[in-house]
Image (tube, rainbow, N blue to C red):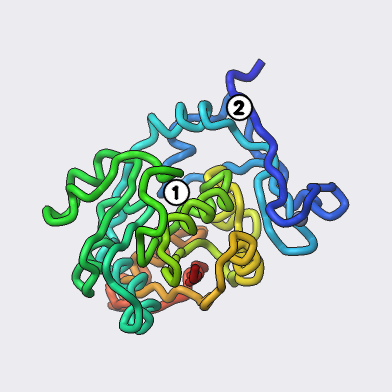
Amino acid sequence: MSKYTYITKECLFCSSTDAANHPVVYHKNFKDEDLNAEVFEARKTTKHTHYEMVKCLKTGLIFSRHILDDASLNELYKGSAINFNEMLEYIKNDYWQPIANYVKGWTRKKAVDIGCSTGFFLEALKDNGYEEVYGVEPGVEPKAIARADIRDNIHTGFYGKGLYPPNHFDLITCFQTLDHLSDPLGMLANMRENLKPGGHVYMIMHNSNALQARLFGEKSPIIDVEHIYLFNKENIKLLGEKAGFKVVEVFDIVSRYPFSYWLRMAPLPLKKMWIGLFKATGMYNKIMPMKAGNMGIILEK
Ligand SMILES: [Zn+2]
């Protein structure tokens, strides 16, 4: 018998998850014996382990149908190594650009970033006029290296009901977290409660309908055991509306990374040969803007 317990997830939009409208798109590709902490590391380069994934024919929502329960997940995540993203300075700019113009017209008093890691986006918010910035991050390591003026405002733990007062924030941000949650609507409900009327949510997540995702299919890095619900530009709007928000805008995120980074991340065969080739051309360290399959959404309470 397996030492892990599974729970079943439902479509976020249909009242029932009937097989006729939610066919299997990818079959589960692991046995419980294969599971270990390494499988749950964020930047693994090994093959992607995934649950059985189904697709809602009405909304295009792709989701993991039978997932490990929280206790099993916590056990596996506990042992997985934290690897900090060496691209944080680039990411900070890429994530800031889409709201740079919007914030000029917004009240910039209190903001919180959910899953804030080292607080890199809190730096951007503070440096762009937000008076008080807060962060929520389950890992203890990222807080230790956070900027000194931000560190004390990072709460170690999970975001949930009651952590912050109602009608409190002008802006709530959340990056690359939504697709990892087993209850995304629950998080949006908490955000809505914590926001002031007229306040905004800004989230970034994978786009399941992006070119890369369509091209690589099951081999795409987004088809992974860490992802429970995967959204596209249409159904992310539905999710925002279902949570009671007004959708302001949905857009592609442009990533501006050195070419060497793209090459290392690409699911290519003969990678060493490609790296050698591009090092020789001098292109290797050039900054190259690309739509890497991420999208952003801005919601208003
Ligand atoms: Zn459905």
Q: Is residue 263 left or right of residue 6?
A: left
Q: Give the residue type that dot 1 points to.
A: Thr
CA distance for labels 2 and 1: 20 Å
Q: Is residue 149 left or right of residue 100?
A: left
Mark 2 or mark 1: which comes first in sequence?
Answer: 2
Q: Nearer the viewer, residue 149 or 57?
A: 149
Name which residue lies at 18% across and 55% down: 150
Q: Is residue 279 left or right of residue 247?
A: left
Residue located beneath label 1 in the image: 45
Quarter occupied by residue 100: bottom left
Whole-percent x, y for residue 87 in the image: 29, 62
Residue 32: numbered disc: 2
Image quadrant of ligand 1 equals bottom right
Q: Secondary structure at mark 1?
A: loop
Crowd rating for badge 2 (residues with CA inside 10 Å; few <14, some 14–19, many 20+): few
Q: Give the residue type that dot 2 points to.
A: Asp
Q: Nearer the viewer, mark 2 or mark 1?
A: 2
Q: Is mark 1 within 8 Å of ligand 1?
A: no
Whole-percent x, y for residue 152 in the image: 18, 47
Q: Is residue 184 left or right of residue 158?
A: right
Looking at the image, is 168 positioned above or below residue 33? below
Name which residue lies at 62% across and 62% down: 239
